[in-house]
């Protein structure tokens, strides 16, 4: 007679200790891989979020610079909405010289100069639209890099004088700010004088006794990093065409 336990002896066999350990090891490897992948995805998402945040903060600063710098040289004296101003502006003599522009050059010239220094730009515009440069530097403006922040100010120059205050976010450390005039897209155009130059195009040879328009394009490069994580960096570049041409009066040079 068979022992009932013999019929089930082969089927009741469990895992050996070695098999159990091997199974646990394989499971741990799979789990470790899943955790690592999840961590990488999460970290990548965090980096992207930080980069987007940094880009937004710096873009806001650069947009502010762009909008204000486009006003450089503006003066009410030649506001297109002023019909008398436009009529005076377009007066031309028998030789084709814009004498109306020459007469206005002294006033407009007060606002036209742009000074570019190391990490700095200074300029003027007719803030109160009265056609004259106000005293006390109220219509002298600028941007500069100072202490890891972009600053703007009034009554300023690139030597450091004036009233400056930060405009960039404290979440960002600005590492570089440069202003460069794009020579290839900035020209001198003669409007009063002999209108003759070396190559006949009236653009380059402005000199004594002549008044010229200076059309300018400024390249701005802004670089920064997150205050909380210096490995997250962004560099932005912008081209700003100055809307108001600068008068260059060579009569007094």
Image (cartoon, rainbow, N blue to C red):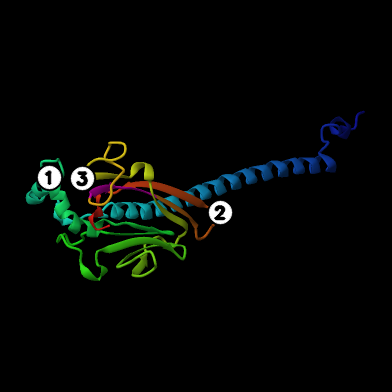
Q: Residues within 10 Å of mark 2 (few under 14, many from 20)?
A: few
Q: Pointer 2: what residue?
A: 231
Residue 37: image x %, image y %?
62, 43
Dominant secondary-structure state across the stretch colored magenta: strand
Going from the N terminus, do you reach mark 3 or mark 2 first?
A: 3
Chain part drawn in magenta: 210-219
* Label 3 secondary element: strand
Query: Which is more toward the observer, 28 or 183?
Result: 183
Residue at the (11%, 47%) spot, across then down: 86
Across and down, in percent, residue 145 comes to: 43, 61
Q: Is residue 209 left or right of residue 183?
A: left
* Badge 2 element: loop
Give the left or right position of residue 8, taking residue 136 as reference: right
Q: In the figure, 143 relative to 243: above or below?
A: below
Report the disc number at residue 90: 1
Q: Tell me the element at label 1.
A: loop
**Quadrant in which residue 1 is drawn:** top right
- Residue at 24 percent across and 67 percent down: it is 138
Using the image, tell me which numbered label, if any, was put on residue 204.
Answer: none
| Structural distance between the alpha carbons of marks 3 and 2 | 52 Å
Residue matched to label 3: 191
């Amino acid at each position: 007679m068979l022992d009932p336990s013999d019929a089930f002896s082969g089927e009741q066999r469990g895992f050996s200790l070695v098999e159990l350990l091997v199974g646990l090891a394989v499971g741990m490897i799979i789990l470790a891989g899943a955790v690592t992948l999840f961590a990488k995805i999460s970290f990548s998402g965090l980096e992207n979020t930080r980069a987007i945040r940094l880009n937004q903060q710096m873009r806001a600063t650069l947009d502010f610079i762009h909008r204000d710098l486009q006003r450089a040289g503006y003066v009410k004296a030649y506001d297109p909405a002023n019909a008398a101003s436009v009529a005076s502006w377009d007066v031309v003599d028998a030789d084709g010289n814009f004498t109306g522009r020459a007469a206005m050059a002294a006033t407009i010239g007060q606002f036209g100069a742009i000074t570019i220094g190391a990490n700095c730009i200074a300029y003027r515009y007719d803030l109160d639209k009265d056609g004259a440069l106000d005293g006390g530097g109220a219509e002298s403006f600028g941007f500069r890099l100072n202490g890891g922040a972009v600053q703007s100010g009034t009554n300023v120059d690139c030597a450091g004088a004036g009233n400056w205050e930060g405009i960039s976010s404290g979440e960002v450390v600005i590492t570089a700010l440069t202003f460069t005039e794009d020579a290839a897209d900035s020209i001198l155009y003669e409007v009063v004088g002999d209108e003759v130059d070396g190559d006949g195009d009236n653009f380059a040879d402005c000199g004594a006794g002549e008044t010229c328009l200076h059309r300018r394009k400024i390249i701005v490069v802004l670089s920064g990093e997150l205050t909380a994580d210096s490995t997250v960096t962004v560099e932005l570049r912008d081209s700003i065409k100055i809307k108001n041409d600068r008068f260059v009066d060579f009569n007094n040079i």
